[in-house]
Image: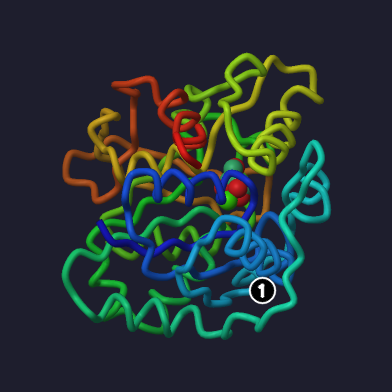
Amino acid sequence: MSLWVDTDYGFDDLWALLLLRRYGATVEGISLVAGNSPLPQVIANALGAAQAYGFDAPLHAGADRPLKREPETAQAILGDRGMDSRGCFLPDVDGPQPPADAIEALAGWLMQGGSREVLALGPLTNIALLVQAHPEAAARITRLVWMGGSNGPGNHSPLAEFNALCDPEAADVVARAGLPLDVIDLMICRQARFGPADMPQTDPLTADLLGGYLDIGLSRGRDGMAIYDPVAALALVRPEAFDFARQTLQVSVAADDTYGATTFTADAAGLTRLPTAPREDIAHLCLDALRQEDGQ
Ligand code: RIB
Ligand code: CA
């Protein structure tokens, strides 16, 4: 399976990329978007992860701000790097910056035709810009899987999930674009939780970064942490692990407390699918993707 990934490069985004590799999926391009942290930090995380983990997918810099609203990051929760740690961090790489051509690069990849699956792990700014500037390319997307939104309470405001709230206007453009969209929302991700006893045997850097991610929950008095982006990656490579229901998606762009909230309405003819239940132990499948393989 070959695909494209659009990401704001927090740890769970990195975890999703490691899961894709473990399942043998080939990432043919990575577009970067401001979200968890400002775009320069997202780029630094992408370069550091490529060096530390040997990722070789071409990197392309995309939007450094939302379509309309003021930028908002998750650095107050995740730290300045948009990725916390119990010790080691990704290396700082003095290398060439990725070209600032994400929208054109994604459009070019889509126009090659064939199966064109896109995994979006951050705000939908880049995808919305693609829809607006290259609708003929966007129409070539055979499946768009997005970690975002919530068919229930939010996580960054009471009503809105972070990726949706980061750029509600972009999410609204994508929701209206008539794309085959799978929304891996907070409610299914909240069914994929892990705690200290679930930590996999893995390399020291991954263990420190995974610990930093787990500490987001533990430091707030919870017994563990939900798994976000890796669940979306799992839904892309292993859709049989989920039950899906067809919906119509609406995104609020109202200037009130519903801003960024996502509403799902059951619709048998809807182009949006929502995973309604896991058919397998999705937390275990995500954690197992980090387990160090023999000889690693
Ligand atoms: O709400 C979770 C999402 O916000 C994840 O994609 C995480 O990486 C952050 O971007
Ligand atoms: Ca993300």
Question: Toward the viewer: 168 or 275?
Answer: 275
Residue at 55% of width from left, 44% of height from top?
A: 261
Residue at 64% of width from left, 56% of height from top?
A: 166
Whether 221 is drawn above or below 210: the answer is above
Disc 1, ligand 1: is the CB inside 8 Å? no
Question: Toward the viewer: 182 or 175?
Answer: 182
Q: What residue does disc 1 label?
A: 64
Quadrant for residue 90, please give it. Answer: bottom right
| Residue 177 coordinates in the image, percent (x, y) | 33, 65
Residue at 74% of width from left, 60% of height from top?
A: 91
Residue at 37% of width from left, 69% of height from top?
A: 28
| Residue 62 coordinates in the image, percent (x, y) | 56, 76
Report whether residue 260 is seen.
no
Whether 49 is drawn above or below 243: the answer is below
Report whether residue 285 is seen.
yes
Q: Is residue 65 left or right of residue 28?
A: right
| Residue 170 coordinates in the image, percent (x, y) | 51, 64
Whether 255 is drawn above or below 229: the answer is below
| Residue occupying the far front of the picture | 295
